[in-house]
Image: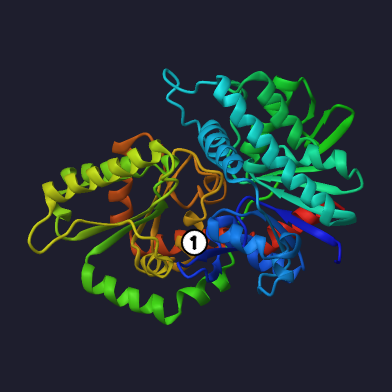
Amino acid sequence: MKMSAILVASNRGPVSFTLSEDGALTMRRGGGGLVSGLSGVATDLDVLWVCAALSDGDRSAVRLAPGGRLDQAGYETGALRMLDIPAATFHRAYNAIANSTLWFVHHLLYDTPNRPHFDARFRREWESYQAYNEAFAMALAEEAAHGAKTMVQDYHLGLVPAMLRVERPDLRIAHFSHTPWAPPEYFSLLPDEVATELLEGILGADHAGFLTARWAGAFMDCCESVLGAEVDRAALGVTHGGRTTRIGVHGLGVDGEALWARASEPDVESHMAALREQVGDRKLIVRIDRTELSKNIVRGLTAYREFLAAHPEWHGRVVHLAFAYPSRHDLPEYREYTAAVQRCALEIEDEYATEDWDPLILNVQDDYPRSLAAYRLADVMLVNPIRDGMNLVAKEGPVLSPQSALILSREAGAAAELGEDALLVNPYDVSATAHAIHAGLVMPEAERARRGGRLACAATALPPHRWFSDQLAALT
């Protein structure tokens, strides 16, 4: 089998499989922003993608494929190897460590009087995270040609660079963090040995990439504080254990042409017609998110409720379309948060709805064409995360609806690029967000057009192809 010169490793892969009752396998495109951003790039550059089997259908497909190489088993996947990691190991690594610990740390989500608890159970879960990362490192070592470039993605695989460096010192290795990075005082909530292993894991790479200078700076601060590493902030380098890792800032934008092409297809047009009929000639405030703790949906709904209370002149003249797609329902915090979103929506309906006006439409079914239709019709886009590595909704919205006003949390990575033309808000300040909703609705058309044009240009300045090629160039 041909060894690969460029490899990508991520938890989620470009395709997923479902297993029907009769044992038939159905393949479809994988979900998530990383897959959307990288799929086209990987195909164009003949990249081998290494990912985990996430479902019973994925595991069934892997077991039918020689060496887990699905491209050798008759599937049209592009070069792809999927790892059948034991389900219990995967669950502990993914849910207990990646999503319940690392995600919470980097997004500053812990209710610290009560959590976290780093006890004996956590240590067992950490061992699964180590085993999960080791499976990726070994697969990459087996598949990579001499001197190959290996692009390791995100917080799920924080230990892979150092593990892979031991197995294959000839490789050029990059790690990219798609999340924020916690400042040292919060990162140090982690057990000392875990914090050290994570930082040294990423420093096994030749190049460590981040979405903004803010997140890169936080990583370097952690390396200095936790490891005592030598940090050169001017040259963007961290030296530790006799090696220097270069630090890169690579903002990720959207492919405007591809996005518009998809948003112009008949299924999107059909959804637009249905939404126009439902909303009428009212102004439309749109949010599109996973029901994720960091996305701050409840405060966004509460701000809309406060706006309605303060501005009765808008009753009957505006509709808030909130897409809150299910996320991580394996975790109790997410189930509780989804229930809180639904309660808040019902309270708004009970207080303000009339026979001929529905002030809020809450949609919890993942429907990409309907989301694209909503973008195109938006008068105001509400993007108010507590903390976000980038947030591509903030970039997709202005591309598809340049006439809309963008309300954007200053804690989103996208604020670094879009802040001058967005209405920036403190995501914890509900009243300020309510004021921003009103400001967005009454913004003069000429100002909307000026801001919207600049937002669209900034959103498309760094499409996925450039984002990826810049990192490849950094490994040369």
Position in image of residue 221 (x %, y %): 68, 26
Position in image of residue 64 (x %, y %): 67, 65
Q: Does residue 241 appear left or right of residue 349 in this picture?
A: right
Q: Would residue 276 be seen by someone viewing this image from the given angle?
A: yes
Q: Does residue 82 appear left or right of residue 306 in this picture?
A: right
Q: Does residue 239 appear left or right of residue 297 in this picture?
A: right
Classify 361 as above or below 27. Answer: above
**Tag 1 residue:** 396
Q: Nearer the viewer, residue 194 or 65?
A: 65
Pointer 1 local density, CA inside 10 Å: few below 14, some 14–19, many at least 20: many
Q: Nearer the viewer, residue 98 or 87?
A: 87
Q: Amino acid at mark 1?
A: Glu
Position in image of residue 4 (x %, y %): 83, 61
Helix, strand or loop at disc 1?
Answer: helix
Residue at the farthest front position: 22
Residue at the farthest bottom position: 266
Residue under the point 76% across and 30% down: 200
How many numbered marks appear?
1
Residue under the point 64% across and 35% down: 128
Residue 217 occupies quadrant: top right
Q: Nearer the viewer, residue 207 or 125?
A: 125
Classify 98 as above or below 402. Answer: above
Residue 443 occupies quadrant: bottom left
Residue under the point 47% across and 54% down: 394
Position in image of residue 289 (x %, y %): 41, 52
